[in-house]
Image (cartoon, rainbow, N blue to C red):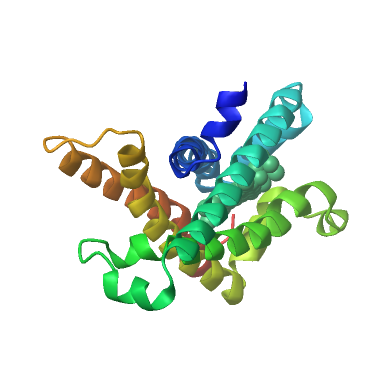
């Protein structure tokens, strides 16, 4: 077991864990986006879906998945911050600016900042829905889960926070996806352009998909 912990003390080990947790979180985003599409099918469909996840026997599987998901986020963030600190220490600011690799993109150099914005978004998001669905007081007024989502997205502040955060999610995924492949050593003259494009398409699909909900409920929703 000693070798295992030693590996994760090295930069490569850290990057490996980031890549694997990153892929896992992307997988979660696909499942989450699919679940959210029930919002487009109306209140009965969405409330039924949330009920199925939280109030039937499926709840035990969901609770275990939530713990795994939280660990995935925690490792990804913890490792990301450690890597960033380590890179900063290795390259003092002056040298860093001069020696910035011309091939490195603005996004790749600023992954920590897009990450920070996504983290703040996540805290706000969990308070809006996860907490509100389970422990919030709005429900005591007779509001359903669907009503909570509609009410949140009809608030211009939240609509803007959600849409802007999805732009940063796009930037983060766009670089993160290809970087994860590189870390895993899957870097090849022939396949790398394909991976870059796949990352681009996945980033657009997920961020535009998520942004569509606040945009729809704010601008186009007429009530059900
Ligand atoms: C903007 C569109 C989004 C909508 C409409 C949405 C909707 C929701 C809803 C309704 C819940 C509560 C589910 C429940 O407790 O049963 C939830 C939970 C959650 N969301 Fe989102 N979400 C969106 C974007 C995102 C994004 C971009 C992320 C990640 C960066 C994310 C991460 C999470 C997490 C981690 C949970 C808790 C999962 C759980 O406990 O099962 N969401 N979301």
Q: Residue at x 65, y 38 (%)?
A: 71
Q: Where is residue 208 in the image (x, y as percent from the top left)?
A: 39, 55
**Quarter of the image with the C terminus in it:** bottom right
Of residues 86 and 108, the one drawn nearer to the viewer in this rendering: 86
Q: In which quarter of the image is residue 125?
A: bottom right
**Quarter of the image with the N terminus in it:** top right
Q: Residue at x 52, y 33 (%)?
A: 7
Tell me, yes or no, if residue 102 can be seen here. Answer: yes
Of residues 142 and 208, the one drawn nearer to the viewer in this rendering: 208
Q: Is residue 18 above or below residue 203?
A: above
Q: Is residue 75 above or below residue 56?
A: below
Tell me, yes or no, if residue 144 can be seen here. Answer: no
Q: Which residue is drawn at 17% across and 35% down?
A: 188
Q: Where is residue 32 in the image (x, y as percent from the top left)?
A: 54, 41
Q: In which quarter of the image is residue 81?
A: bottom right
Which residue is situated farthest in the bottom direction here? 94
Of residues 43 and 116, the one drawn nearer to the viewer in this rendering: 116
Q: Position of residue 54 (x, y in %)?
A: 74, 34
């Amino acid at each position: 077991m000693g070798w295992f912990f030693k590996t994760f003390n090295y930069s490569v080990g850290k990057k490996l864990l980031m890549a694997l947790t990153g892929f896992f979180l992307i997988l979660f985003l696909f499942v989450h986006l699919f679940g959210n599409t029930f919002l487009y099918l109306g209140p009965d469909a969405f409330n039924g879906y949330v009920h199925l996840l939280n109030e039937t026997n499926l709840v035990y599987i969901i609770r275990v998945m939530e713990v795994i998901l939280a660990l995935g986020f925690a490792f990804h963030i913890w490792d990301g911050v450690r890597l960033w600190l380590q890179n900063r220490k290795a390259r003092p600011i002056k040298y860093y600016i001069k020696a910035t690799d011309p091939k490195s993109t603005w996004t790749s150099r600023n992954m920590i900042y897009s990450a920070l914005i996504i983290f703040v978004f996540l805290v706000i998001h969990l308070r809006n829905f996860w907490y509100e669905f389970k422990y919030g007081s709005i429900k005591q007024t007779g509001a359903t889960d669907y009503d909570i989502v509609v009410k949140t997205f009809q608030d211009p502040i939240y609509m803007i926070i959600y849409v802007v955060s999805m732009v940063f999610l796009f930037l983060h995924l766009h670089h993160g996806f290809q970087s994860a492949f590189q870390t895993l050593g899957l870097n090849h003259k022939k396949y790398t352009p394909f991976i870059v494009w796949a990352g681009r398409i996945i980033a657009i699909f997920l961020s535009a998909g998520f942004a569509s909900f606040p945009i729809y409920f704010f601008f186009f929703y007429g009530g059900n």
